[in-house]
Image (tube, rainbow, N blue to C red):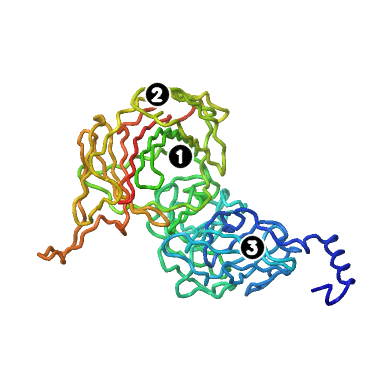
């Protein structure tokens, strides 16, 4: 069109421009997985949140929005999400920061996808499909890495605010203000896109938090941050029994769990002081047999982690009263990135496993965001009854360990759980098995899977019992027609249920270890998964 309208002069000018400024003539390109939450650099993204795009030729110059409402174009660049133009904070050749319009629809059932396109004078980027959800919680960090010290304020008893840091800790009983992203949209007070809220605007649902591994029962505020476009805020009181530390882990929970970040806590406020460093190791040998899941068959796996940190405690195994079960527990999904904030994952170097079926060398694990996790498939049939020797020569950061563990006998499920079997919500569910050894714990879960996590009921018994029963929870009064009583296992839905059975030692074996304060424990598990019920 240029040549037809203006002739050869325009063509020469365009060629000169392309040679001098190549970005003018190269269409924008978005990196693989390059559209992420701007606080955590994780996916999914969420409506109303701040999102970063990483790529090349995203803009011909660097430009920053200087007022609100945020502009829809900067330096000739604009972004659309499902065809809806996004307000822009910042553009540059390699990065764009924008706000997702709160009008982009999401699915209540789980993740959906949205199409993100970057447009410049040189053309359009290829459409990028990005995971999308109602929420995608994250907390901003002071070094903008997505892991580490949170952007947080201390609220002292006199109501004064100060920045939380290693030099300025909060005390137990004080309030903390976290600034985050992706908590969701306010139901009644969501401001127009690109505009900051003028005051408090609570989310339509209660958010949660986790402090040093313990859930927070109540957040005093969970909503939009007044005066800041696309930024969210969570206020909570530090529990009285929270330990001191320069990097106490915290996370935000909606339907998803945010990557873990840290805050500084000291009973006397001021400069933080860490408690003594503690460490422990966990090793697992797992044989899984699945039917009706779409991934049927047997898999044998080795997994291990060695954690170290101030005041670190080994998690305790849950205990239930005989004959009871825990109903409607929930495991939410995490975002695509995790941070082992506040603690360190240690490498044990290469680990050697010798069993009745032979020997396997587990290569050294690699670290990412502070996490070092061993996870490797083993030959089918490798995990079986018998003695196993496990040893590691250690590394510069982890002492050596060695020892033996005896893997017990598997169980055989007697209850018919073939695909299509009905699990009635108004009748007791009994699972029977044979085999196994006395002292082996058999755990049974009824699992209802959603797009964002798993709800489940679980209970356990000694293998010698041979059976377990779930009695439904019933309300109302029974009538001859059966219409006056409602029974459920506590799960939010029972259309599709998974029964998961695992058998493992009630008393976990420990290996001889040096330099690991709480030692290394080895567990083995026979796991049976029955889907399509």
Residue 438 versus residue 6: which sits nearer the camera? 6
346 lies left or right of 67:
left
Residue 29: image x %, image y %? Answer: 68, 58
Q: Position of residue 238 (x, y in %)?
A: 44, 54
Q: Nearer the viewer, mark 1 or mark 2?
A: 2
Which label's residue is closer to the chain start, 2 or 3? 3
Q: Residue 51: x, y in percent?
A: 59, 61
Query: Residue placed at 11% from the left, 65% from the top?
Result: 479
The image quarter containing residue 11 is bottom right
Question: Looking at this view, is 389 or 190 the one in front?
Answer: 389
Within 10 Å of the Cα at label 3, are there few (<14), some (14-19), or many (20+) other Cα atoms? many
SS label for mark 2:
strand
Mark 3 — residue? 97
Q: Residues within 10 Å of mark 1 (few under 14, many from 20)?
A: some
Whichever of labels 3 and 1 marks the residue nearer the N terminus, that label is 3
Residue under the image location 23 percent in, 42 percent down: 415
On the image, numbered disc 2 is attached to which residue? Answer: 388
* Alpha carbon separation for disc pair 2 and 3: 53 Å
Q: Which residue is identified by label 1?
A: 311
In the displayed orientation, state which residue is furthest to the bottom.
5
Disc 2 vs disc 3: which is toward the camera?
2
Distance (Cα) linking label 1 and label 2: 32 Å
């Amino acid at each position: 069109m240029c040549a037809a309208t203006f002739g050869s002069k325009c063509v020469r000018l365009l060629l000169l421009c392309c040679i001098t400024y190549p970005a003018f003539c190269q269409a924008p390109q978005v990196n693989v997985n390059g559209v992420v939450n701007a606080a955590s650099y994780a996916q999914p993204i969420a409506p109303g949140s701040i999102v970063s795009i990483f790529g090349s030729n995203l803009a011909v110059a660097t430009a920053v929005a200087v007022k609100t409402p945020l502009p829809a174009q900067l330096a000739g660049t604009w972004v659309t999400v499902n065809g809806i133009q996004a307000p822009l904070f910042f553009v540059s050749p390699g990065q764009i920061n924008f706000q997702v319009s709160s009008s982009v629809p999401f699915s209540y059932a789980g993740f959906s996808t949205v199409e993100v396109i970057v447009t410049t004078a040189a053309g359009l980027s290829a459409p990028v499909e990005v995971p999308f959800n109602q929420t995608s919680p994250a907390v901003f960090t002071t070094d903008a890495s997505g892991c580490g010290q949170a952007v947080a304020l201390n609220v002292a008893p006199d109501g004064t605010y100060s920045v939380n840091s290693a030099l300025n800790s909060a005390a137990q009983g004080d309030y903390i203000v976290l600034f985050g992203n992706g908590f969701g949209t306010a139901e009644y007070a969501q401001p127009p896109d690109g505009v900051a809220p003028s005051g408090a605007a609570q989310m339509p649902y209660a958010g949660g938090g986790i402090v040093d591994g313990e859930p927070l029962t109540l957040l005093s505020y969970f909503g939009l941050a007044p005066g800041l476009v696309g930024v969210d805020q969570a206020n909570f009181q530090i529990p009285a029994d929270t330990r001191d530390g320069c990097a106490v882990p915290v996370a935000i929970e909606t339907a998803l769990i945010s990557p873990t970040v840290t805050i500084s806590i000291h009973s006397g406020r001021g400069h933080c002081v860490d408690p003594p460093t503690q460490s422990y190791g966990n090793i697992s040998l797992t044989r899984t047999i699945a039917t009706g899941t779409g991934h049927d068959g047997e898999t044998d796996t080795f997994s291990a982690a060695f954690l170290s940190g101030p005041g670190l405690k080994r998690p305790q195994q849950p205990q239930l009263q005989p004959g009871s079960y825990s109903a409607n527990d929930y495991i939410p999904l995490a975002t695509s990135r995790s941070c082992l904030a506040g603690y360190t994952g240690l490498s044990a170097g290469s680990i050697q496993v010798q069993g009745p079926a032979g020997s396997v060398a587990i290569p050294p694990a690699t670290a990412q965001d502070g996490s070092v996790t061993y996870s490797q498939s083993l030959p089918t049939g490798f995990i079986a009854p018998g003695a196993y020797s496990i040893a590691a020569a250690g590394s510069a950061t982890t002492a050596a360990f060695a020892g033996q563990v005896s893997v017990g006998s598997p169980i055989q499920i007697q209850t018919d759980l073939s695909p299509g079997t009905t699990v009635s919500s108004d009748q007791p569910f009994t699972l029977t098995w044979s085999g196994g050894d006395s002292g082996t714990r058999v755990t049974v879960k009824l699992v209802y899977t959603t797009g964002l996590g798993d709800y489940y009921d679980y209970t356990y018994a000694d293998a010698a019992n041979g059976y377990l029963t779930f009695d439904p929870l019933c309300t109302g009064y029974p009538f001859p027609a059966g219409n006056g009583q409602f029974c459920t296992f506590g799960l939010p839905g029972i259309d599709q249920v998974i029964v998961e059975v695992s058998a493992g030692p009630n008393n976990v074996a420990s290996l001889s270890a040096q330099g690991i304060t709480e030692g290394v424990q080895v567990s083995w598990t026979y796991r049976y998964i029955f889907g399509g019920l």
